[in-house]
Image (spheres, rainbow, N blue to C red):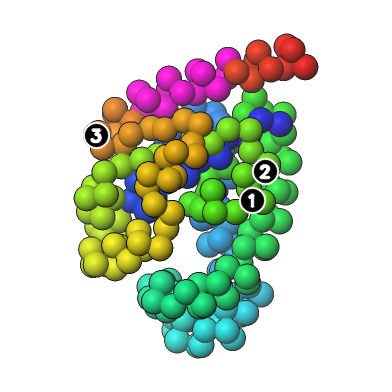
Amino acid sequence: MYIVGLTGGIGSGKSEATRLFAQLGVPIVDLDIISHELTASGQGTLKEIAHTFGQDVLNDDGSLNRATLRHKVFADNKARKKLEAIIHPAIYNKAIEALAKNASAPYQILAIPLLFESDRYVNIINRSLVIDSDPTIQITRASKRDGVSQTEIQKVIDVQMPRIKRNSLADDIIINNGSIEDLEKKIRQLHERYINTCIFEKSNS
């Protein structure tokens, strides 16, 4: 199976990009969605998170208070490492299961915020795609989307891989500073390239 790893900084437009790929019929395995499923009320992963970080990371209904957890994690490097140790192995196992179900597709998208930070994902993809945006646009988008201050978004950016380094590691880059229509056009062009690449590799295998 042919896997394209899609990544980008916070507010770069990863979710919109995966939505547009999905509209073209491309299977999507999104680690953010898997993470939300694993941290739903009653899940063992959520219970472990609450035990490690305190009951205040839970809302009154037992769901995860992501804003509180984000504040604790990004303010403390050791805390972030603890969270990663809890959730990353579980996410990886679910992702592998989902990818296997899409094995017959020409190619599929593995959407992951921290693609280059983990060898386990870099080693299973065939190609990497970065959705990149100007930092000021990232901050504005993410602040509006998440309902948090621009200062909090900047803290998230500060602990993510530097933009220049992320882009240097990518096989493909889409600059997403414009409209949704502009992004859609770029994704359609890349989709055709990926399809042609998969057809070529299959014919020569």
**Residue at image location 43% in from the left, 20% down from the top:** 189
Q: Amino acid at mark 3?
A: Gly
Label 3 – label 1 distance at C-alpha: 32 Å
Q: Give the residue displayed 46% in from the left and 81% down from the top.
A: 57
Is 8 inside the magenta-drawn segment? Answer: no
> Residue 171 placed where, x, y %?
51, 31
Given residues 50 and 153, the one toward you in this image is 153
Mark 2: amino acid: Asn
Q: In the visual, does 9 lie left or right of 116?
A: left
Name the spot of residue 123 as percent of width and height, x first: 67, 43
Q: Are marks 2 and 1 in contact (CB under 8 Å)?
A: yes
- Mark nearest the camera among 3 and 1 is 1
- Tell me the tag on residue 119: 1
Farthest right residue?
Answer: 205
Residue 148 quadrant: bottom left
Q: Which residue is mark 2?
A: 123
Q: Are marks 2 and 3 in contact (CB under 8 Å)?
A: no
**In 3D space, how far apart are the residues under numbered discs 2 and 1 (Cα atoms)?**
6 Å
Which is more N-terminal, label 3 or label 2?
2
Is residue 3 found left or right of 185 in the rendered image? Answer: right
* Marks 2/3: CA–CA distance: 32 Å
